[in-house]
Amino acid sequence: MALPNVNPTTTASWKKLMHHFTDAQHLKMKDLFAEDTARADKFTINWDDFYVDFSKNRITEETFKYLLQLADEVKLKEAIESQFSGEKINKTEGRAVLHTALRAPETATVIVDGANVIPEVYKVKRKIETFTNQVVNGDRKGYTGKTFTHVVNIGIGGSDLGPAMVVDALQFYKNHLTTLFVSNVDGDHVNEVIKKLNPETTLFVIVSKTFTTQETISNANTIKSWFLESASENDIAKHFVAVSTNLDAVKSFGVDANNVFPMWDWVGGRFSLWSAVGLSISLALGYSNYASLLEGAHKMDVHFKTADFDKNIPVVLGLISIWYNNFFKAESEAVIPYSQYLNQFATYLQQGIMESNGKSVDRNGDAIDYETGTLIWGEPGTNSQHAFFQLIHQGTKLIPADFIGFVKSLHGNQDHQDKLISNYLAQTEALLNGKTKAEVIEEGTLDTIVPFKVFEGNKPTNTIFINKLTPESLGKLIAMYEHKIYVQGIIWNIFSYDQFGVELGKQLASKILKEFSGEAKNQHDNSTSNLLKYYKQNS
Ligand code: F6P
């Protein structure tokens, strides 16, 4: 069964939303709260250790009703079923999309091309577990007999961002291994990492689904050459392991066949941390924490698959985002975690969200005449309050924001935690209420200064309050955003799981590279020709 194929703008609910928007665009959330003292109870989802309050949005019960109807009209329920059951919903690449199968229980059955993939998934998990234990316990040793102290993940995009974000976010749960990440083809990146390493005690994990990615292969080769300055070819097998679907390429790089962790074409790069791509996570945190991360994601999968849409967190967040993106024409969304641990979270989400839904052609291959995709950005609070919050509060742009917070701190410093959470709650309250002219005057402000101190308010936020940052709750949070991506892709009638838009730049870069070595001569526009000349003359 193919994915449903419905142009959202032709649905009855879209038309109702359009009509409703003419009035709803003037809604003042402050009035909505004054009119209905139980508003937050209606627009809150309390699920497991998640408390998701979406009442501070420019929506009424009528808006919510039409948005839910839209989800029904584009056949979201069927689309969710198609994804989970292993149908080849990534039609342009002829693949199933099964990151959910990677965190399913061993008893599950998910059929791809006539075979259940779950036994193979668990075979690889066991291999990850055994390998992790050997490295962490010190049973596996380097070429001079020393135990490993450092792990370096060599990968880019989905083969870097997920593991790097999770290892950083869960550093509280980390073991003694120092985990570093090399991604950029910028040679200064790899050299700065190499500076910190001893070849005798470092394990390298090369992660590349295709094993053809320029950045990763260049970095792996540079590191191999550096390694061979002190070790021999035979020692490579002890220090280099690989995660890939391209087993031949891995072998010719010199990785021992026993040290290859397979993945499958039905795992998209940006959704791959749940596969062996997460090996560095397992090594850094220990296998049981890695398993808890997957368990959390699975719980969110079950919620997404089974909860009614009006109580379904990824569905509701996806619909609200559509409301702002397509009706208010908001161009971006901010994600503000009130946890320094989630420092890399927005960067991670940028690939997931923008590589998936940055599309301008619908599922028929026709050009789209409505907005898709959202620009996603953010930084942890409270730091961001002292950086870009001025623009959110008083700028001209509408920036809906997700505020993510944790009730409990990990180190248990209650004084800091109270200060952090007071800021977390105060900001969404300030964004909702703003400050009126009368309030500013009452503060005794000089007449000439009054307009500058008025806050319009009415700025929408979702508050995602989670009990505590644990491997399990982080798994839930990541999966929540993954599913939100799919909800939006289905509504926009696009294919979320290909990324052809990243190819053109790669092709041109390899052509230009050949010009540097004199192997080719290409025609360029005047600007690019001048820039090339400038580089050649000055490099
Ligand atoms: O350039 C984009 C991309 O294809 C991503 O989708 C992917 O996560 C990344 O490159 C890395 O790809 P690979 O794992 O094959 O090296």
Image (tube, helix red, strand yellow):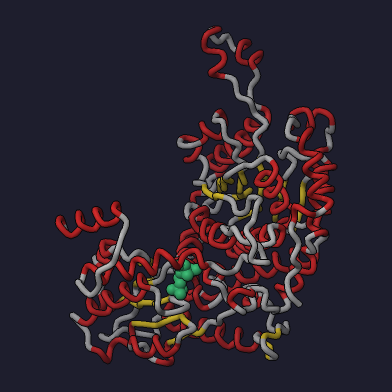
Side (left or right) of 395 relative to 50: left
Dividing the picture into quarters, in which one does residue 483 lie? bottom right
Specify the quadrant that holds the N terminus. bottom right
Q: Is residue 322 above or below residue 113?
A: above
Q: Is residue 193 above or below residue 414?
A: below
Residue 77: image x %, image y %? 79, 65
Residue 52: image x %, image y %? 71, 49
Return the residue found at the far left.
Answer: 537
Residue 524: image x %, image y %? 31, 60
Report the residue at 56% width, 80% height from top: 265
Q: Is residue 22 above or below residue 514?
A: above
Q: Nearer the viewer, residue 73 or 268?
A: 73
Report the residue at 73% width, 51% height from top: 319
Side (left or right) of 430 relative to 215: right
Q: Nearer the viewer, residue 510 or 252?
A: 510
Side (left or right) of 284 relative to 511: right
Specify the quadrant that holds the C terminus. bottom left
Report the residue at 62% width, 77% height from top: 102
Observer able to see residue 159: no
